[in-house]
Image: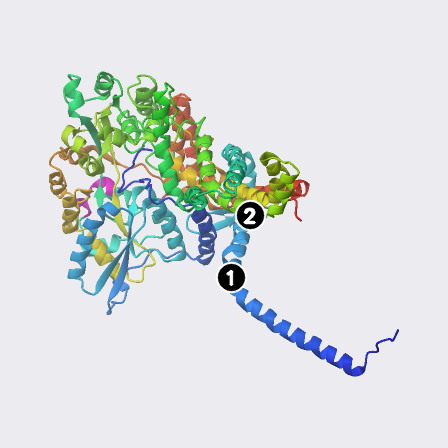
Amino acid sequence: MVAVTETPERQQTRRSVRRRGSARKRIEARWAWILIAPSLIGLGVFSIWPIFRTLYYSFTLWGPFGGHTWNGLSNYKTLFSDSEVLRSLRNTIVFAALSLLSVPIGIVVSALLNRQGLKGLSIYRTIYFIPVITLPAAVALMWRFVYNGDYGPINQVLGAVGINGPHWTSDPSTALYSVAVVAIWSSIGYNMVLFLAGMQTIPRQFYEAAEIDGAGRIRQFFQITLPLLSPTIFFVTVISVINALQAFDLIYVMIGKNNPALADSETIVYLFYEKGFIQSNGGYAAAIAFLLLGIIIVFTAGQFWLQRRWVHYD
Amino acid sequence: MTQHKPTTSDRQSEWAQPSRRKVLASIPAALLMGAAACSKSSSSSSIASEKKQSGPVTLTYGLWDDTQMPAMKKIIAEFEKANPKITIRTAVTPWDSYWTKLQTAATGGSAPDVFWMTLAYAQLYESNGVLMPLTKPVASAKIDMSQYDPAIVKGYTWGNDIYALPKDIDSIALWYNKKLFAEANLKAPDNSWGWSDVLAAAQRLTKGDVHGIAATLSDQQTYYNTIPQAGGQVISDDGRKSGYDSPAAIAGLEFWTDMINKYHVSPSLQQMTDTDPQQMFGAGKIGMYYGGSWESVALKAIPYALKNVDVVPIPQGKTRKTVSNGLGNVIFAKTKYPREAWAFVQFLGSKRAAEIQAESGAVIPATKGTESAWVKSTPQFNLQTFVDELQYNYGFPVSINTPAWRDYATQHFTDAWTGKKPTADVARAIAKQMNSSLAKEPKRPS
């Protein structure tokens, strides 16, 4: 074996190549910084900095026109003994749990639409996606009419078969569920697009092989589709939970103030809005916002921890 | 649920709901603004000492009611004609976002030069130095404040200072369905009616899917009238104590809750949440409806109502009382153009501007003697009723931070309206919360 000796010339060229490479890298890096700077600055000024300001304000007593005084932990002390906060937390968690139903529904609908040779796929996709691009306020107003206890189509149909339907959105026992149905309905389209994209990355060969082995459609769905879709399911679940915990607009439009069902359907963000913007209690509202942030972090971290047990990356 | 006054009180506009994202997004912005503005404006700016502006000036005029825009545009056109160097730019923000936006803008020093104010927020803005005191300019322009309704003038006076020239006023009266009254062989209500007459008529009118009366959960339209009629108070005269726990106030509230839960002559709160009671009344499903002067515009637009409904004075209890709210035009304390802003506000408070508003039919101007044009705007209804009631009105009950307890009260009265808890218990619980909210307010100047 002939040992290849490094000549000084060779070392020289290698070094210069390396130097030239690192010079190019430096320039690239500089450009990268320049190009991401606008959004980084924007993020810093409009997101990161305010988060810390909000944290600071959550320890203050808030004046209506920006004046504030240090208040220590007193906002947080009130927070944990405030029955309104506890109640709206319960509502929010129930609402989030119900909203998660949109994940299995989305998977089933997508699986049905993902069949080979299905005619009019894009029409179905459009139909399911329409609620996603419609203004939430418009969706809520339309549903409020649908839910109307005296004149709404649901109760008209129920009435025709002799059932006396409730006032869906103003009866405390049904309001939260009625709103959750709308939340599910309007998020299926969004979830479905993600699920369909995920399903289409699953190689056909797997299904062909399964078919040769004699697996039926149902078996294929559980043995191939679900495991290989699990990263998408995980992503959609995390996003859905975060969205549901921040629910506000549907409650605001469909329930609204002076509704006898408000206490049983008011979410934590609605309470935040009420304290901060109606009652000018900004410091307390900031504390509520941090409570919500903490809850979202806990829920999301919990999901990331759980994912190791059921999400398959290959 | 119920519609408050779309012009002077808080109407929940369904078309301008802030989305969750918008609300969340506005937190950092609002907080940032809060950090930016630490100095409070001095409230002693005097117009006479300001330098005269020589160039053209553009003033921003903030308001919230689209239906009043035609009248406002006409007023602005006349003002601009007389003052060619001043241009007025209107900024319309729907009610729900108006106050959030205004509060943020005022904190950051960029509120409109001139804007609408309602009694419910007046003291909050006055006590924080956001508004320019108008006492001196009013005196030097020799404006006679007694030309405006005293309840409204009083509402915009803070300490010894006047902060607004009143724009309009409202009152509450009894709207009734002539057709349903005739079918039930009932005589039309009149000025002599008391509480028992209302109940008796409501019982006769209730039949099938028609209800005798709508016991709406709307403070201004219902219990802000019956509480003083029973001899009670919503808030003490000095604005320091709740009156909800007095037996008289409870009687004023029970007048309404009994209509639903004891006599069953009103739709339930659930029904009135799902369908606006004004709509039910306009469609002939309700016999009697306590409504405001501003509601004639909406009722006039329904052919059935235009033909079949009319209005009579509000039935009385132990004393004669009805509540009035009213808007005022105010000037931002930090405006760059106080002279021009004052010239504009002065015109907005003039008799000419009042007449233009009256003719539009939307609101009763606060200027006395201009009401007849408003009455004539809708001859189908006896609108003179509302004007006559101004003799025994009282100003909308307020303290410095009215929204803090007012919102809480309406939200918690739902338990009494649905019959979940006894009205007296709910009233006492609300009084307790209201008192603790009032205790946090600074003292008012005497």
Q: Position of residue A302 (x, y in %)?
A: 63, 41
Q: In what element is the residue under mark 1?
A: helix
Q: Is residue B60 left or right of residue B378?
A: right
Kindly identify the residue that appears in the image at 15 percent across and 25 percent down.
B178
Q: Are marks 1 and 2 on the same chain?
A: yes
Residue type beneath disc 1: Ser
Pick the residue in front: A171 or B357. Answer: A171
Q: Position of residue A37 (x, y in %)?
A: 53, 65
Q: Position of residue A189 (x, y in %)?
A: 47, 43
Viewer-nearest of labels 1 and 2?
A: 2
Residue B157: mark: none
- Please say whether residue B47 is visible from this viewpoint: no
- Please say whether residue A18 is visible from this viewpoint: yes
Query: Which quarter of the figure has residue B174?
Result: top left
Q: Chain of mark 2?
A: A
User: Magenta region's main secondary structure?
Assistant: helix
Q: Is residue B109 left or right of residue A307?
A: left
User: Quick one: quadrant of the N terminus of chain A?
Assistant: bottom right
Residue bearing the label numbered 2: A200
Kindly identify the residue that appears in the image at 20 percent across and 55 percent down.
B76
Residue A39: mark: 1
Q: Chain of mark 1?
A: A
Q: Which residues are magenta?
A: B145-152
